């Protein structure tokens, strides 16, 4: 318990943008063959520091086979919610779920991120027992504690009952139980986020565990059996109030990115692939007249390729799909970054007019066929994947691995872990920073990145910027 | 003009009603940031003022709910002393409970942002805001009853009920005046940075205030 709100909590997105820049980036490391324990890397991102763009500390977990993927802070700017009436917690602990094991690690980053250590481990049995869910994924710090989305229900293969969201206490990290009161027709899960003062949540669908744990199932994809719906929820009442089907060919609706400014009642979601033409797409959803609406607002075409350049999975198509596997919205809601993991491109869209995204910048790196190197000459395997934007919007960080078994199908030659950064111009335009290249330890891949003091996919706000 | 000790006591008690109102009003936990948020979200100072209404009514109802039973109780003239002592002990115990159990009632976060009145009511009850007023109210009743002498029970209840409503209204008015001024200053002049900068953890002070009010009332109650 503190006497003042954490100085990294900001009332509005604008105040968050004006705060001091990040000095550490936390990145989860994954042992793709499960031969080593997964780990958390602490990377120095302070320009001019002698250890700039290097790992300065690693927290290695005591178990193997957890499969780290997404993670998040125990508390963020949402703690300034006037309804919660109690802002006295610290942004201090990283909540790191093992997506394969359902184990959850709580890592303490204070007093010094270079000495971060494990604070608590929540064993899978506790998650199973108290929630009936498995395979924890997205973490968001919210009004009643920490919200954790899961990809699996009960049972060995996670198909006994639908997956959903559960809540953890943000100080004791006790698993409190299921969040939903009425889930409506929701049976698959992936990402979720909200607008706190407007009191709604949006959630998306990826797949059930048998559809992803041992790799993508081509028959399921071609018969459109992956997720393709968005669910809109009454946040406080915990009810699903509306479900919108994007059309079955729009397979895998993943990251949900609402505008940070709570006055703006819209947001975005990325769709990995359209099974009719291999396009990736960006969709804009908004609320109007008490109802939610959605439309496809940008598409990214596949790129033709010779059969012998393609992995067996794609040889029948003669093309590389862009595979939009992550999107992230800048704090001022101006630029949307779109990771095209298949074609090896990071796109920057100007979304000042949210229903008319304009391509403003692009960086080519990696890719199944292109294999574009980093400007420093290093080979970049895989493609741009999890992306995180600095609070001030000037630096965009990303890694290159998607998910252990899927990496092997799309990039059979392997994906040595890499983390890079691009500088974004205020008016649009993106350029890779030559001096930012994080060498990850051998045998590890990297997935999500979190910045100290908060970032564009962590913090949610209760007051507008105006 | 002669000002008697009783007049002084009366003045101090009314001052305490107003002071506790101001104290509750400036505490962000009692809702002024919600008025700021309402004003900013709708880009209108009218929305800010409109939000103050339900906040004030919720607080007022919480006061009445807690004080009114005491208004009926103190009509039992023979039991005045034990009632006062029990009320003081109740306030002290609640303060001590808040000191020991530091967990914030997270259920409050379940109330939707559209239900400001309900939120204000629940917050005031959960934090013992209304309880803080009980010993002050009982003190005022004693002063008033001293004037009416041994009137009939019916008359006493009327006096006490009127006093309960009066105390609640004066307290809630002071509360919303302080909170409203602060909300307006932040909205118009100080900016949102003030929300996080000015927010001090008052939990300990709040719990201590409850214990203090209870202890003072207990001392008077035992003396009488």
Image: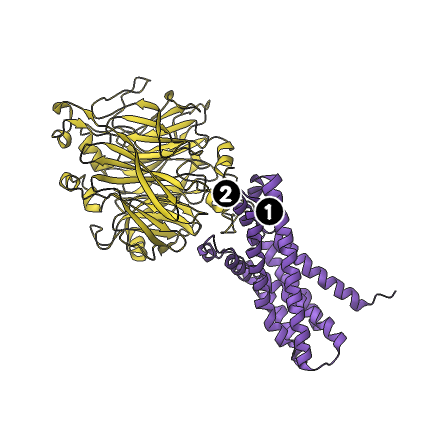
Quadrant of res A43: top left
Q: Are marks 1 and 2 in contact (CB under 8 Å)?
A: no
Residue count near mark 1 (Cα–Cα under 10 Å), binned few <14, some 14–19, many ≥20 = many
Picture layout, residue A259 above or below residue A51: below
Q: Position of residue B219 (x, y in %)?
A: 70, 68
A91 sits to left or right of A138:
right
Q: Nearer the viewer, residue A207 or A28?
A: A207
* SS label for mark 1: helix
Quarter where residue A425 is shown: top left
- Identify which residue is drawn at 64% across, 54% down: B23
Q: Chain of mark 1?
A: B
User: What colour-coding does the image apply?
Assistant: by chain
Q: Residues within 10 Å of mark 2 (few under 14, many from 20)?
A: many
Q: Which residue is mark 1?
A: B183
Front-lying residue, B153 or A209: B153
* Residue assigned mark 2: A463
Residue B53 in the image: above or below residue A77: below
Using the rendered image of the protein, determine whether residue B224 is visible from the camera's viewpoint: no
Residue A297 at least partly seen: yes
Q: Give the chain letter at badge 2.
A: A
Secondary structure found at label 2: loop
Q: CA distance from mark 1 to mark 2?
A: 13 Å
Q: Is residue A461 above or below residue A424?
A: below
Identify the hue of chain A. Answer: yellow
Q: Position of residue A215 (x, y in %)?
A: 18, 39
Q: Residue at x 35, y 56 (%)?
A: A177
Chain assigned purple: B
Q: Which mark is residue A329?
A: none
Q: Residue at x 12, y 23 (%)?
A: A308
Q: Residue furthest front?
A: A289
């Amino acid at each position: 318990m503190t006497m003042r709100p954490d100085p990294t909590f900001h009332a509005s997105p604008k105040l968050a943008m004006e705060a001091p820049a990040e000095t550490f980036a936390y990145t989860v490391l994954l042992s793709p063959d499960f031969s080593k324990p997964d780990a958390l890397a602490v990377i120095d991102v302070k320009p001019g520091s002698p250890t700039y763009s290097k790992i300065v500390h690693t927290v290695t977990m005591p178990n193997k086979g957890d499969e780290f993927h997404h993670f998040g802070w125990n508390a963020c700017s949402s703690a300034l919610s006037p309804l919660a009436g109690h802002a006295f917690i610290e942004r201090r602990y990283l909540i790191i779920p093992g997506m394969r094991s359902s184990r959850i690690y709580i890592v303490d980053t204070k007093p010094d991120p270079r000495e971060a250590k494990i604070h608590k481990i929540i064993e899978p049995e506790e998650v199973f027992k108290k929630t009936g869910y498995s395979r924890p994924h997205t973490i968001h710090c919210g009004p009643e504690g920490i919200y954790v989305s899961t990809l699996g229900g009960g049972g060995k293969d996670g198909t006994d009952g639908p997956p959903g969201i559960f809540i953890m206490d943000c100080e004791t990290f006790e698993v409190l139980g299921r969040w939903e009161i009425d889930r409506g027709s929701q049976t698959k899960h992936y990402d979720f986020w909200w607008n706190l003062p407007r009191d709604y949540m949006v959630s998306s669908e990826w797949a059930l565990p048998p559809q992803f744990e041992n790799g993508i199932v081509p028959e399921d994809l071609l018969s459109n059996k992956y997720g393709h719906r968005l669910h809109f929820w009454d946040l406080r009442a915990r009810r699903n109030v509306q479900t919108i089907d994007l059309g079955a060919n729009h397979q895998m609706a993943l990251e949900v990115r609402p505008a940070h400014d709570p006055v703006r009642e819209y947001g975005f979601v990325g769709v990995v692939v359209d099974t009719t033409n291999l396009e990736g797409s960006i969709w804009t959803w908004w609320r109007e007249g008490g109802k939610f609406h959605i439309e496809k607002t940008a598409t990214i075409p596949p790129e033709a390729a010779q059969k012998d350049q393609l992995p067996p999975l794609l040889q029948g198509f003669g093309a590389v799909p862009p595979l939009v596997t992550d999107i992230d919205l800048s704090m001022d809601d101006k630029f949307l970054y779109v990771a095209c993991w298949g074609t090896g491109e990071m796109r920057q869209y100007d979304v000042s007019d949210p229903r008319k995204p304009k391509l403003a910048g692009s960086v080519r790196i990696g890719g199944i066929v292109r294999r574009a190197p980093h400007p420093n000459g290093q080979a970049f395997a895989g493609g741009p994947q999890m992306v995180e934007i600095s609070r001030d919007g000037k630096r965009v960080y990303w890694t290159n691995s998607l998910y252990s078994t899927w990496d092997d199908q799309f990039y059979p030659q392997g994906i040595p872990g890499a983390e890079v950064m691009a500088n974004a111009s205020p008016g649009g335009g993106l350029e890779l920073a030559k001096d930012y290249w994080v060498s990850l330890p051998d045998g590890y891949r990297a997935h999500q990145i979190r910045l100290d003091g908060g970032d564009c996919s962590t913090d949610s706000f209760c007051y507008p910027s105006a | 003009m002669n000002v008697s000790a009783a007049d002084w006591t009366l003045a101090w008690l009314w001052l305490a009603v107003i002071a506790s109102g101001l104290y509750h009003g400036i505490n962000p936990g009692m809702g002024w940031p919600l008025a700021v948020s309402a004003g900013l979200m709708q880009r209108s100072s009218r929305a800010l003022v409109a939000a103050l209404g339900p906040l004030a009514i919720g607080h007022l109802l919480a006061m009445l709910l807690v004080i009114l039973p005491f208004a009926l109780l103190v009509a039992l003239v023979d039991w005045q002393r034990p009632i006062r002592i029990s009320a003081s002990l109740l306030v002290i115990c609640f303060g001590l409970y808040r000191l020991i159990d530091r967990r914030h009632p997270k259920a409050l976060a379940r109330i939707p942002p559209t239900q400001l009145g309900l939120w204000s009511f629940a917050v005031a009850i959960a934090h013992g805001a209304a309880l803080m007023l009980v010993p002050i109210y009982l003190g005022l009743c004693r002063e008033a009853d001293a004037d009416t002498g041994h009137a009939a029970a019916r008359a006493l209840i009327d006096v006490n009920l009127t006093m309960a409503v009066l105390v609640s209204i004066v307290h809630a008015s002071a509360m919303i005046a302080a909170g409203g001024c602060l909300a307006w200053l932040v909205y118009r002049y100080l900016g949102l940075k003030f929300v996080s900068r000015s927010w001090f953890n008052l939990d300990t002070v709040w719990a201590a205030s409850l214990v203090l009010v209870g202890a003072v009332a207990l001392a008077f109650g035992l003396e009488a």
